Amino acid sequence: MIYLSLIDHWQVYARPLAEVKEWYAKTFPGEGEGPEDAAPGGHIPGQIAGTSPSTGPQAEGNPAQGDAGTMEGESGEDGAGAESPKGTASGEESPDASQVTSGDPGSGQEGSLDGQEGEPDGEGIQDPPGQDTSEPVYMTVEDSYFADAVFIGDSRTVGMYEYGGLEEISTFYATKGLTVYKLFDAEIVPVEGQKKKMTVEEALQQNSFSKIYLMVGINEMGTGTVDTFVEKYKEVVDHLLELQPDAILYIQGLIKVTTARSQKGDYINNEGIVARNEALEKLADNQRTFYLDVNPLICDETGGMEASYTFDGVHLKAQYIEIWKDFLKCHAIQMERGE
């Protein structure tokens, strides 16, 4: 009873109780309030406008299905430009200017959940259609888990290849300067026995994987807006899953830069990274796509990357790649091929 009243606010049971009350009143006229007494205060909590029985008051301000809020949205602009000159702190091609603009989050509708008119009692958030709101169940694995995995990304993923100890176990389609816009077109995958390279798309058409680890976005910080970036990112995710129908995909949040690097005032800043990561997290359905964010393990009290972990404010030093790798090993999903 305490849980239903204080935690759930009777949202789950309000309508069934109302229907029982109506049935009781019709079946046993004059017998008293009956099932209504099951609710504290002598009334059925959570009566929702449009669904309450005729014998009970209707609450104003509630959505028809009892939801008490809307999805909060946020959009931002990281700046304009196409690519930055070489020699930036990131060592990657990127635009030379940025500006982050966050939109106002949507406000949730408040209404009565205890049958009292005009008394808001909690808020809810609508989930995107088809999304699995349950938390994924992760397990801890050994390096062998990555034997059928492909890592796709920019110079940060190159760092994982060079210092993560997975170069002989996993496949890496990574190169300095890779962006979400060039991911399928850039010729970065060596062709065995030949002195040429093929595109990631061609490589994925020729090889099969069970896991895809994707991290791109730092080079796009000064291009377009958060919305345009995530729109393109979603297209990439969808196409990757089409090319690899038996794979699950890990969307890796962008690793933050140091606070000092963020405060330089150019396109690379943690505000923009946070805005993009928040949008990327919403792409995960916890069925085939999962969102992973290593930032809490490598950031200091200022919210930026720990300064001692990096040599340029952007990339992890070799010895700290292990933190990232161990995080991935502790956040693995068990899924058989064909599921």
Image: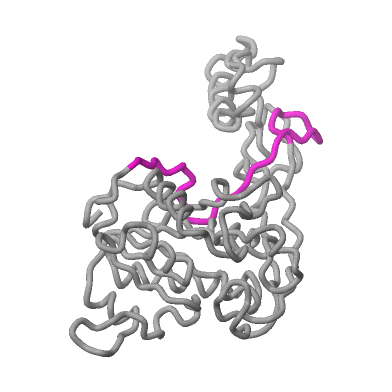
**Residue situated furthest left in the rendering:** 193
Q: Which of the image's four quarters has the N terminus?
A: top right
| Residue 30 placement: quadrant | top right
At which x and y percent is residue 247? 29, 61
Q: Which residues are magenta?
A: 112-140
**Residue 168 inside the magenta-drawn segment:** no
Of residues 213 and 326, the one drawn nearer to the viewer in this rendering: 326
Q: Is residue 71 visible?
A: yes
Say whether residue 94 is left or right of residue 235.
right
Q: Is residue 42 left or right of residue 182?
A: right
Q: Position of residue 14 (x, y in %)?
A: 59, 29
The coloring applied to the image is: one colour
What residue lies at 57% left-to-right and 59% top-to-bottom? 310
Q: Main secondary structure of the magenta part?
A: loop
Residue 119 within the segment the image draws in magenta: yes
The quarter of the picture where residue 170 lies is bottom left
Instruction: Pick the residue in front: 16 or 110.
Output: 110
Q: Position of residue 65 (x, y in %)?
A: 60, 44
Q: Is residue 239 above or below residue 74?
A: below
Looking at the image, which residue sits at the far right? 118
Residue drawn at 24 percent across, 57 percent down: 147
For residue 145, side relative to residue 182 (left or right): left
Quadrant assignment, res 229: bottom right
Most distant residue in the bottom direction = 195
- Residue 45 x, y percent position in the rendering: 66, 25
Q: Nearer the viewer, residue 309 or 183?
A: 309
Q: Is residue 285 visible?
A: no
